[in-house]
Image (spheres, grey):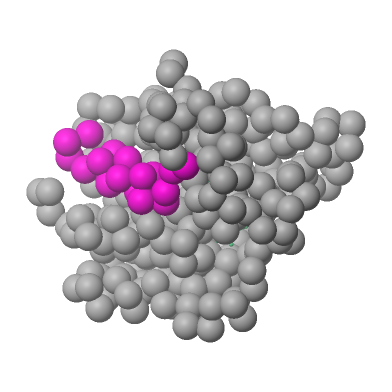
Amino acid sequence: MSDRRVALVSGCGKRDGIGAAIARGLSAAGHAVVVQDIATTGVKDVNEPTSAADPDWNGVESLVEELKAAGGAAAYVTGDISVEADVARMIGKAVETFGGIDIVVNNAGAPFSMGHGEIDKIDPEGWDRVMSINLRGTFLMCRAAAPYMRRKKWGRVINIASVAGRTGSKSNATYAASKAGVIALTQSIAMDLGPDGVTSNAILPGFILTTRSLSGMSKKLGKSEIDADTIAKATPNVPMARAGTPEDVAGAVVFLASDAASYISGQSIIVDGGNLRL
Ligand SMILES: NC(=O)c1ccc[n+]([C@@H]2O[C@H](COP(=O)([O-])OP(=O)(O)OC[C@H]3O[C@@H](n4cnc5c(N)ncnc54)[C@H](O)[C@@H]3O)[C@@H](O)[C@H]2O)c1
């Protein structure tokens, strides 16, 4: 890496979430990292364990301590990415703390059950809230970070979409449509910011083991406990013969954030163990 960059990663409140893994990966690569969530330990879906189940984990505060203990530079911010004033405050804090913003990773996503269901059962309010978090929130964060990247003539926009944004998803049209929007947003930003040295890419994870995805699976299957056998059955066509880990996604982010990826832009990088071969 040529020099230390400043990264802001949204949705980092859960110990085993994709956001925390991305923050750990970027920190290990030498970047200063600002970790974000709507609440210190994130929002839980209906079947997710509460913070009481993990008393040693205080969300983004614990993550910052962990990154600093490992020798990294880190800070946290809390706020709602769908609210313009919150986004302005959070980006402002990153700039004030570390002097700029070079890498924005939009990982925050609405809880699994929100806006969920077959098309004729989707609650329009759930639809609107998912769109406001997944799509408007990603847009607001990119919009607020763009001027700092343009100024430096270097930047990285990395949006965590989903394979569902390409394939659609049964009983999950809201989520799939929001992630398809994120993919088109990412491509458009690549065109707007490319002349200023900023790349913009989406990562499309397949099934990644986190408390959010396991709670989604337990809702879908009507089971309270998900065992290894159930997970194996849910990923029958994955050539790598396993579910993904948050670190699998983080690896792709660290690469896209690096100087080695300076000529890759407007792409959707699928991280699903080879399941979709497009
Ligand atoms: N886990 C998977 O299998 C999988 C697959 C494809 C895509 N993804 C995407 O990866 C991302 C992370 O997923 P995860 O499984 O780690 O789930 P997660 O629930 O751990 O992460 C999402 C985080 O976003 C935060 N958040 C929700 N609303 C917010 C708001 N308005 N403002 C700020 N933060 C908010 C939540 O508190 C949570 O901590 C999501 O965008 C998800 O759609 C996950």
Q: Position of residue 76 (x, y in %)?
A: 42, 71
How many numbered callouts? 0
Rendered-image quadrant of the C terminus: top left
Q: In this rendering, is residue 217 above or below 265?
A: below
Span colored in magenta: 243-261
Q: In this rendering, is residue 125 above or below 162?
A: below
Q: Position of residue 74 (x, y in %)?
A: 31, 70
Q: Does the magenta run of residues contain 130?
A: no
Looking at the image, which residue is at 74% across and 45% down? 221
Q: Position of residue 212 (x, y in %)?
A: 60, 55
Of residues 107 and 18, the one nearer the viewer is: 18
Looking at the image, which residue is at 59% across and 31% down? 164
Q: Does the magenta run of residues contain 244?
A: yes
Looking at the image, which residue is at 47% across and 62% down? 16
Q: In this rendering, is residue 30 above or below 51?
A: above
Check the image and name the residue furthest to the bottom: 55
Looking at the image, which residue is at 84% across and 39% down? 122
